[in-house]
Amino acid sequence: MKQAKKTGKAESNKVVLAYSGGLDTSVILKWLQDTYHCEVVTFTADLGQGEELEPARAKALKMGIKPKNIFIDDLREEFVRDFVFPMFRCNTVYEGEYLLGTSIARPLIAKRLVEIAKKTGANSISHGATGKGNDQVRFELGAYALMPNVKVIAPWREWDLLSREKLMAYAEKNGIPVERKHKQGGSPYSMDANLLHISYEGRHLEDPSAEAEESMWRWTVPPEKAPDKAEYLDLEFKRGDLSAINGKKMKAHELLATLNMLGGKHGVGRLDLVENRYVGMKSRGCYETPGGSILLRAHRAIESVCLDREEAHLKDDLMPRYASLIYNGYWWSPERRALQALIDHTQQNVNGWVRLKLYKGNAIVVSRDSKTDSLFDPNIATFEDDAGAYNQKDANGFIRLNALRLRIAANRAESRASKKKD
């Protein structure tokens, strides 16, 4: 359907909107109808955010969306199996702390937006990412990689509703039901949740010197209120992916949900971070990633006995680049795919188990082993008699060779110092 000429907007016959039913996307739905006069298709993804999604359907129906144009998809298994687990095979951490809980969900959402656009005959997609945030980049790079001629409508880059208070005023004026106030007053936090994490931004978190409210946290208890008794977990890995917890095999999304529950109970996985955003600003966010924090620790532990030293070091060298690709929205790029192929190749022999102790905010590795693929040889590593497995005298030549350049440099420095004295 062509939009009214008075808008001056590019033609959009049908738009697929990434729709949560929250403040931003509820306003966007109405704004698209009023501004573009196009047919809107809503897409709501269940990524394990732990909230009832059917209210999104009711809100969409109330806004005049046809039932056939409302998509609410359970993507939990695909999300963990095809996005979270591949990322953790690389032990991925951005800027030394962030486990990329928001970033890794965006390529899947972009993929599904494009799939729905093709299924419904839409030529446009829309999202609620702010015009100065990272998600706009991630959504759109993903969409263009999968549907190069798709039109993208980014309301935050077009409208003048540039604050949460203005959004709520617009919602009230247009009869859009949204949560008006945070329970302690003021606008609600800007939050993002999925099976890997929950994030919080806005409110007084915009002051990096302010401590987060304890009432803000949803998944984790503070360490001081965690159980006084430690809890042990046995995690099994197959080809680098978590396959069982305490001997119980589960689907990928069930495994991560279980780790979230156990980690949250023991206060594992809180993070208060000021990150360097792709778009050039510093931004503070608070994160809860209990399952991911446990998984990262355990995966590195099983790799420590299964991976060759140089393989492990190569992965560590590549990890920051891989993390930046995900953070910056390049999941569907050829370079990420190439890195993934290399990473996955290193995981073929990462099989075994890890035991961890959860206690007061900590996930502590206490043991690990692999019956089939361990490179750890106790006969060589022992401090007792190794029956000739290792000849200590071999170290003489190795050390002298590696020290040669250091000795040459030191001799040269001494010679120069001696000449200066003369």
Image (cartoon, rainbow, N blue to C red):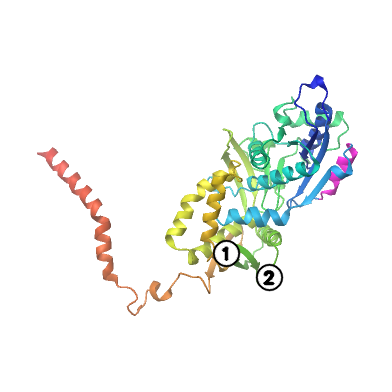
The quarter of the rendered structure image containing the N terminus is top right
Task: Report whether 82 appears left or right of 180.
Answer: left
Frontmost residue, 116 versus 194: 116
The quarter of the rendered structure image containing the C terminus is top left
Residue 420 in sight from this viewpoint:
yes
Residue 104 numbered mark, or none: none
Mark 2 vs mark 1: give the one in front.
1
Please tell me which residue is depicted at 70% across the width and 63% down the height of the picture: 251
- In the rendered image, residue 180, in percent from the top left (x then y), is placed at 82, 36
Residue 239 numbered mark, or none: 1
Residue 91 in sight from this viewpoint:
no
Frontmost residue, 218 versus 14: 14
Residue 248 numbered mark, or none: 2
Give the magenta-colored segment's residue range. 52-63
Q: Specify the quadrant of the image occupied by residue 28.
A: top right
Decide: marks 2, 1 in contact (CB < 8 A)?
no
**Kind of residue at disc 2:** Lys
Please rate how many residues cluster around mark 1, counting C-alpha atoms within 10 Å: few if below 14, some from 14 to 19, many from 20: some
**Along the polypeptide, which appears first: circle 2 or circle 1?**
1
Q: Please identify the residue farthest to the top as the structure is shown.
A: 6
Q: Is residue 295 above or below residue 102?
A: below
Q: Is label 1 in a helix, a strand or a loop?
A: loop
- In the rendered image, residue 263, in percent from the top left (x then y), is placed at 65, 59
Q: Is 71 a magenta residue?
A: no
- In the rendered image, residue 117, in percent from the top left (x then y), is placed at 76, 41
Q: Is label 2 in a helix, a strand or a loop?
A: strand
Q: Is residue 120 above or below residue 404?
A: above
- In the rendered image, residue 313, in percent from the top left (x then y), is placed at 44, 56
Task: Report whether 126 appears left or right of 279.
Answer: right
Please rate how many residues cluster around mark 2, counting C-alpha atoms within 10 Å: few if below 14, some from 14 to 19, many from 20: few
**Kind of residue at disc 1:** Arg
